[in-house]
Image: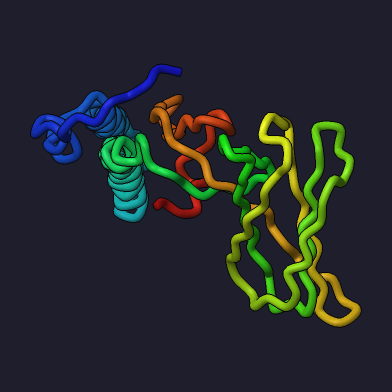
Amino acid sequence: MTPTTATATSTNALLGVNAGSPSAAAASDAGDRFLKLLVTQMQNQDPLNPMDNAQVTSQMAQISTVSGIDKLNASIGGINSLLLQSQSLEGAGLVGKSVLLAGNQLELAADGSASGGFELAGAADAVTVSVKNAAGKVIDTLELGAESGGRHGFDWKSADAALTGLTFSVAARAGAAAVNATPLVADTVDAVYSDGGQLNVGTRNHGVVRYGDVLGVS
């Protein structure tokens, strides 16, 4: 994958949707070949058993359908290309900014502080955040009490600012029923990547994630 930088969408790229493109030319050639076959068929038909109007109309409709589908596919391909360029411009604006992602890693600041978040599928009577070390052992718990459905954040501070590999989990309940909780983390965008028509975001601590997986920007 190669980092991409923001560039203005060119006039040529914008015109590519409506102007002749390799795909559009191929669609035209296919339609021409189909029409030539039909003319040849009519020229060589049996005079005693000629094609009726219904047959001719049916084959003409097939020509129109095939040509229309090919042209539509070519147009969609051009639109997809423009959408990717637009996303690249938007994505480039994320470089250096903090984004919200689904994840459960805790990164400590120099003073040992860390922040995390979660999204609740519904209101909960009790929410508990469990902080775990690199071995997966719970080293601290935060009792957050009742929380409404939606996104929430929490802060935590370690006595040892050198700890690494920390993660957290969230457990929420409404009465006796569990409430689904999705862990969320913040990270910084370092680069934007384009790979096979897919726009990706390179983050400082969580590697490469899909642009569509970015849940928020601050």
Q: Is residue 178 above or below residue 85?
A: below
Write the residue at 50% across / 53% down.
215
- Judged left or right of residue 1, residue 84 is left
Q: Is residue 10 visible?
A: yes
Which residue is rendered at x = 47% and y = 30% of the image? 202
The percent position of residue 115, horizontal first and vertical second, equals 60, 50
- State the image coordinates of residue 103 (x, y, percent, origin top left): 65, 45
Number of numbered discs overlaid on the protein picture: 0
**Above-or-below relation of 115 to 28:** below
Q: Nearer the viewer, residue 75 or 104?
A: 104
Q: Quadrant of residue 38?
A: top left
Give the colour scheme shown: rainbow
The residue sitting at the left extreme is: 11
Please, is residue 2 above or below residue 96 in the view?
A: above
Q: Position of residue 11 (x, y in %)?
A: 8, 34
Answer yes or no: is residue 40 visible.
Answer: no
Relative side of 130 to 76, left or right? right
Residue 114: x and y, percent?
A: 62, 46
Q: Residue at left 32%, top 24%?
A: 4
Quarter of the rendering containing residue 109: top right
Q: Residue at x 30, y 43 (%)?
A: 90
Left or right: 216 with respect to 38?
Answer: right
Give the camera-side residue of 185 and 200: 185
